[in-house]
Image: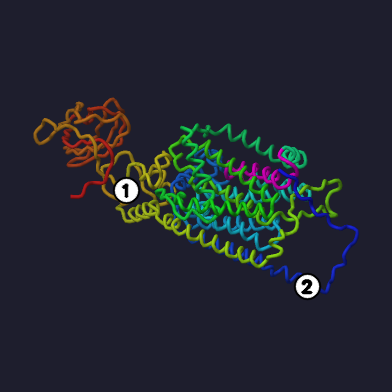
Amino acid sequence: MTEPAATATPDTTTTATPDTTTAPATTAARRVDPIHIAAVVLITASVFWRASITTRGFLTADDFPIIAQADAGGLAPGHLFALYNNHLMPAARLLTWVTHRLTEYEYWPYAALMVLGQVAVSVAFYRLLRLLLPAGWALLVPLCLFVFNPLTLEVSAWWAVGINLLPMQLAMIVAIGAQVRYIRTRRRRHLVALGASVVVALLFFEKALLVVAAVFLLTLCLYAPGGPLRAVLTTIRRWWPAWLVLTGISVVYLAGYLSMSTSALRAPISAGEVGAFLQQFYGQSLPAGMVGGPWTWLDASDGPAVAAPVQAAQWVSWAIVAAFVAGTVWLRRTVAVRAWILLALYSGLAAGLIGATRLGSGFSGVAGLVPRYFGDVLLVAALCAGVALCGLRRAELADATEPAGAAEPASTAEPAEPALIRNHPQPFATALAVGLVLLIASSVYSGVDFGTDWRSKASRDYLNTARAGLATAEPGTVFMDQPVPEIVVPGLSHPWNMQSRFFAPLDDGPTFVTRARKLWVFDASGNVRPAWVKGVKAAPGPAPGCGHKVAGGRTARIPLRGTVVDYWQVVRIGYISDRDTTATFRLGDGEVVPFDVHRGLNAMFLLVPGGGDEVQLAVDEPAATLCTDEIEIGALVPQPVG
């Protein structure tokens, strides 16, 4: 790193007398700052754009287990501090519980909260830009790059992602702002804001520890003078109170988190897997995301799509990014170089974390294309692009109210505008306007396919169909517990993919049993249909007109036509009995399961453990006689039509 430009020192030898005749005009001018107006318009437009996409979708995948766990666990510490897929997020669980208590599975409250969160993040980001960058139209570039970024649409659309990343984004913005203010003023209240923002973010997502890294790297790259070694030493020595606060928070949090979590670190399968991931991360997703891409997406079942820019788009995005980096380095030199180093360091840290936890798993093939992994990286990228394009705002020296003895902060504040911009303002303004329009248009275009994919929600259709069927079902309709379709809740979420867990948050949900004379099932679309069993059947019985005759209190051993795997199975017994009584059923060496027998032609569905190639059936009353030639063991399916 090279020596940053010195901070301009105000002249303190004279005190200017304010001109009261021009004060009203100045106040009015500030009130109608056109940059503020433009920023408000852009933020509003981006929020409406995001809301139009968010509200098309519905809850999906991880949302259902998280909501079901909130319904089951409530405010119990065991629920709030339980890990979900190794994520510690007590505040996220609390907010989910509050929302669920008011709405069940209605999506609009979750969507509204995410949109409101996006408003807060967007406004806070603009305020951070005003704090860091010189006032000027150019700061609208990083603003648009962030608020219109298509790769962050998932953050404001999918509850399970937004509840983690929106607080992290907000905390990163607040923490960076607090650190910059502390650098400029050394006031301790900014350390309080810095620490509080990190603590709050960690209550939503353990990955918010990267906020600490972002604050340190930003301070190192943008505010510490000298080469690399000197900058590191200066950063540690000059702002040690900030690192003391952040280190203390990090150590305490990590001690608690690591005591509960299981290691999520994985070893890559091969060097080729690492290379493919880095190519996806740096060759496809990140450059495309910095220019309004990826333009094309890969469908990801019921969840949000993943980035899939075509080869030509990858080259175009890299060319645009390279030209922008080169142009800003030519214009701003030192501060631009430092800004891009900051992005390289932070993105490398984020990529390393993703690689260490995702490579070597079944999802490694698309790990570098998943948009949610870029929610924090693109925030830093937008900030770095703004610093590289605009320079840093000249830091004000401590005012008269600063505590005595406070040290003057170092700054890499950019001097006056480069001669090219100063001497040719009109072409620069035109290029800026054209660039903004193209960036927004590119982002909106990318959002079209994302929105189309997000609109298609099998989970919404399944849930709505099931609720409609339950509303019209006859009294006494009961079900046996089964997994919901894989597209609704993946099997990796077991046991929270079971119907009993999935429907539990509903006030008018279905009733689940382990035995029933008349049973119903939800088909793959959520329709309520009579149940049947498909699997291994019993061999035909020897008694003419009866099949297998069970009488006199003796146990009948009935062979099966095949072997049943030793696990929980559903059995359907079709029988005719001469009286009401009780009976027992046993599959192989499994548990003996009792059930009621009713006079006449009937059927019974049982959930039984066991396995093997034989079943045992007995009636308890010696005088009773039961005939059956319909025993089938296997999976529950809808009853065949006809």
Question: Which of the 4 quarters of the picture holds residue 493?
Answer: top left
Tell me the number on the disc at residue 524: 1
Tell me the number on the disc at residue 266: none
Q: Are marks 2 and 1 in contact (CB under 8 Å)?
A: no
Q: Which residue is mark 2?
A: 24
Give the colour scheme shown.
Answer: rainbow
Specify whether residue 304 is in view. no
| Mark 2 neighbour density, 10 Å: few (under 14) some (14–19) many (20 or more) | few
Residue 556 in percent (x, y) is at: 19, 27
The amino acid type of the residue labelled 2 equals Pro
Nearest to viewer (mark 2 / mark 1): 2
Instruction: Identify which residue is drawn at 21% across, 26% down.
Output: 555
Q: Is residue 520 magenta?
A: no
Question: Which of the 4 quarters of the picture holds residue 594?
Answer: top left
- Is 129 situated above or below 498? below
Residue 311 in percent (x, y) is at: 45, 50
Residue 22 in percent (x, y) is at: 80, 73
Q: Residue furthest bottom?
A: 21
Q: Residue furthest left?
A: 544
Under tag 1, what secondary structure? loop
Label 2 – label 1 distance at C-alpha: 69 Å
Residue 513 in percent (x, y) is at: 34, 41
Nearer-the-camera pick, 193 or 241: 241
> What's the magenta region?
199-228
